[in-house]
Image (spheres, coloured by chain):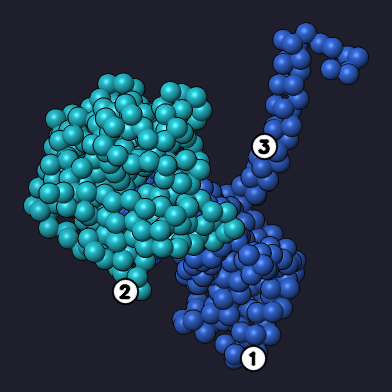
Amino acid sequence: MKQRGILVRDFSHYYGQTRSLNNINLDVYRHEILGIIGPARSGKSTFLACLNRLNDLIPGSRVEGKILVDDQDIYGAEVDVVALRRKLGMVFATPVPLPLTIYENIVFGVRLLGNHNRRELDLIVEDSLQKAGLWNEVKDRLNSSALKLSGGQQQRLCIARVLALKPEYIMLDEPTSGLDPISTMKIEDSLRALKQNYTIILVTNNTKQAARVADRTAFFLMGELVEIDETPVVFTRPSDKRTEAYLEGKFG
Amino acid sequence: MGSQLRLKPRVEQKVVQLVMIFLTSIAVLVLVFILVVILKNGLPQLSLEFLTRNPADMGREGGILSTIVATIFLTLIALLVATPLGVGTAIYLTEYTVESRVTRIIRFGAECLAGIPSIIFGLFGFILFVNKLKFGWSILSGGLTLAFMVLPTIIRTSEEAIKSVPPAYRLVSFSLGSSRWQTVTRVILPSAIPGIVTGVILSIGRSIGETAAVIFTAGSALRMPTSLFSSSRTMSVHFYILAKEGVSMPKAYGTAAVLVISILIINIATYYLMEKYIRRKS
């Protein structure tokens, strides 16, 4: 029996007059990897930003409809946005380590909560880096600058930084778009391992990546959800012609 | 290329380089000339006594200790007031508002403030602080006047520094659960510090060197200042009076030398510290 974690109902999003998401309905199950594919500007990234309300930061951003995360309406009046953002951790397309040490990057969010207990922080750092598959590469230089890491390492650092917040959902926005195949493979391996304990939403430009790691795949096109189903179904017998055309590389 | 005159690329490169070197050396030469004149005339005056004794006989005799103390306190007050105000304004303009008519008016106001001649600031300070608020000719009046004078510089440089912080840092910070204020204090300001400090150094230089705004507001008493309300004379005012009234040219040059050297030391020291800070960060 699959448990539903996120319910999106009749959800639309606007930047000023421009509608960027149109009447989206979908569910995210717990402990699955949901892949979201679609061409550029199809609303994938906006959708992620709506889930943790990072879209609040953009002037002129407006929503209609509902998103329930663990039965809580996240656009309700009494929602603690900061807590929501911790619950739905976000990894961006370009790895953005803050100009701090590796250690301080990982504990950045934890320190915000006022936890400065060195021993607890040490444990969190080791644990998060282990889970992100980076511990062995950096354990001897935790106090050197995170900016010195390679691109792939930086992206795993960003994943570890999100894990340190003990989120329930991890959203990744094209996390491997700028990485080489080996780094990409390492990140995909981490995602498969993380699925045991987290629910993962993976936006990707690379349809093959969705085919490799996603349990279910959603296809977005021009702000609409065209199709969502088990990944093998979407890739072998899509129910919509547009999905088929996109997967065959006819556009996008 | 519409030009008739065509040089071989290598020759052209050489010519352009020479012209650039010539132009740059003019700028450097002016600086060197000033330094040589001031130091040649001023350095012979310098001694431990000159730095540690108060002026006597209207400045003909003795040292300049009281004017050094007055300069330090005036500059300190100016910075203590102007830095939080200026950085705060810059944070507000960049982080807490979206670009609108209001922000443009504030920015335009700051620009205008920057263009006002310093003697007008002196007059303003005289009317507001000296007379209206009854601070009299004092370190406080002078310091506050200087604060308003350097405020635009600090706003402008801080704003540029904050704007140059990569937008992705903000997004990451928010996505990790920061409030806006936490984002400002933990991510934006640490990255913007070098730029902000540059503005503060510029302001220190202007405050130390300012004469017109200070002579109206801090007065020109030669006594050692004893409180914020003491009338007192800064080094630049001292130099101005010594030179203009023909009191003592040697003492005037001595004062100028101290001024120039202290500004140089402040600049070198802060840039050295900034280098260290930036290297530690990256």
Image colour assigned to chain A: cyan
Residue B61 seen in the current view: no
Give the residue at x 84% y 12%.
B6
Image coordinates for residue A154, horizontal then vertical, percent: 30, 35
Sort mark 3 into few (<14), some (14-19) or many (20+) by Cα contacts within 10 Å.
few
Left or right: A12, with B105 as reference point: left
Pick the front one: A196 or A216:
A216
Tell me the subunit letter for badge 2.
A
Q: Does A221 appear above or below A59?
A: above
Closer to the observer: label 2 or label 3?
2
User: In the figure, residue A130 lies in which quadrant?
Assistant: top left
Q: Amino acid at mark 3?
A: Val
Sort mark 1 into few (<14), some (14-19) or many (20+) by Cα contacts within 10 Å.
few
Give the residue at x 54% y 61%.
A60
Residue at label 3?
B28
Measure how far apart labels 2 and 3 are at the Cα level: 63 Å
Residue at label 2?
A78
Residue at label 1?
B132
Do discs 3 and 1 belong to a common subunit?
yes
Q: Does B30 appear above or below B241?
A: above
Image colour assigned to chain B: blue
Question: Which secondary structure, mark 1?
Answer: helix
Q: Amino acid at mark 1?
A: Lys
Question: Which secondary structure, mark 2?
Answer: loop
Measure how far apart labels 3 and 1 are at the Cα level: 45 Å
Q: Amino acid at mark 2?
A: Glu
